[in-house]
Amino acid sequence: MRERVSSITRTTRETRIQIDFALDGSGTAEIETGIGFFNHMLDGFARHGLFDLTIRAEGDLEVDSHHTIEDTGIVLGTAIREAVSDKKGIRRYGFCILPMDETLVLCAVDLSGRPYLAFDAPFTADKCGDMDTEMAREFFYAVSYAAAMNLHIKVLYGSNNHHKMEAIFKAFAKALDMATEKDVRIVDVLSTKGVL
C-alpha cells in the first residue's frame, strides 16, 4: 500500500508555511505558527485524528493573525488532498459528534472532490487566548476548499468559547480520520461516477 503522506510548502509576501502530514500516523505533532492557541488546536487535531503533523508557519503577525491562519488552512487542505491521493478504498464520508464538558459539536466530512463549507459556531468572545475566534471559519473554509471536501461544522450547544473551539478541531480530526479510513469492501472509489 502506498504511504499516505505529503509535504507542502507555500510562500507568499505575507507568509511561509511548511507542512509535513501523514494520514496513517500515531498522533505526533510539532507545531509552530507564532499563535499559541492555534498551535494548541492543531496539536489536538493531530493527536485525536492520529495524524502525524509538522507545521512551521511564519507570517506577518505584526499586522494580525489572519494571513497566518488562513494560509495554514490552505496548506493543510492541500496536504490532506495529496495524502489521500486517488481515494481508492477509503470510506469517503466521516462524521463525529464530540462532547467537551458543556459543549457538543457535530462535524461531517465528504471527500467528494467538491469544496463546500457550512460553519455554524457562535462565539461570544473576540479571542481564545491569542487567536481571533472569527478566524476559525476562515481556517476551515481554506481547508475545505484546498482539500476539495464538503465540511459541515455545527456547535449544537455550549457556553465556553475555549471548549467550543477545541471541540470543533477535535471533531474535525475524528471525522477526517473516519473518512480516510480504508475499507476492504471498497475496491475502487465509493462513487457511482467511478471518480472522486
Image: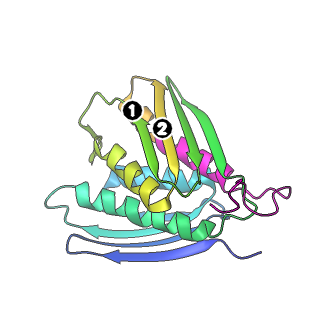
Dot 1: element? loop
- Amino acid type of the residue tagged 1 in the rendering: Ala
x and y, in percent, of residue 145 in the image: 43, 56
Is residue 194 shown in magenta?
yes
Residue in the foreground of this view, choosing between 13 and 20: 13
Mark 2 crowd level (few <14, some 14–19, many ≥20, 10 Å Cα): many
Residue to which mark 1 is pinned: 121
State the residue at coordinates (65%, 47%): 93
As drawn, which residue projects farthest toward the front? 193
The residue at 68%/49% (across/down) is: 178
Q: Please tell me which residue lies in front, 177 or 118.
A: 118
Q: Position of residue 26 (x, y in %)?
A: 66, 61
| Residue type pointed to by label 2 | Ile
Visible residue check, residue 32: no
Q: Quadrant of residue 3?
A: bottom right
Q: Looking at the image, is 151 positioned above or below residue 102?
A: below
What percent of the width, then of the height, locates residue 96?
61, 38
The reply to whether residue 112 is in sight is yes
Residue beneath disc 2: 153
What separation in Å lies between label 2 and label 1 (alpha carbons)?
7 Å
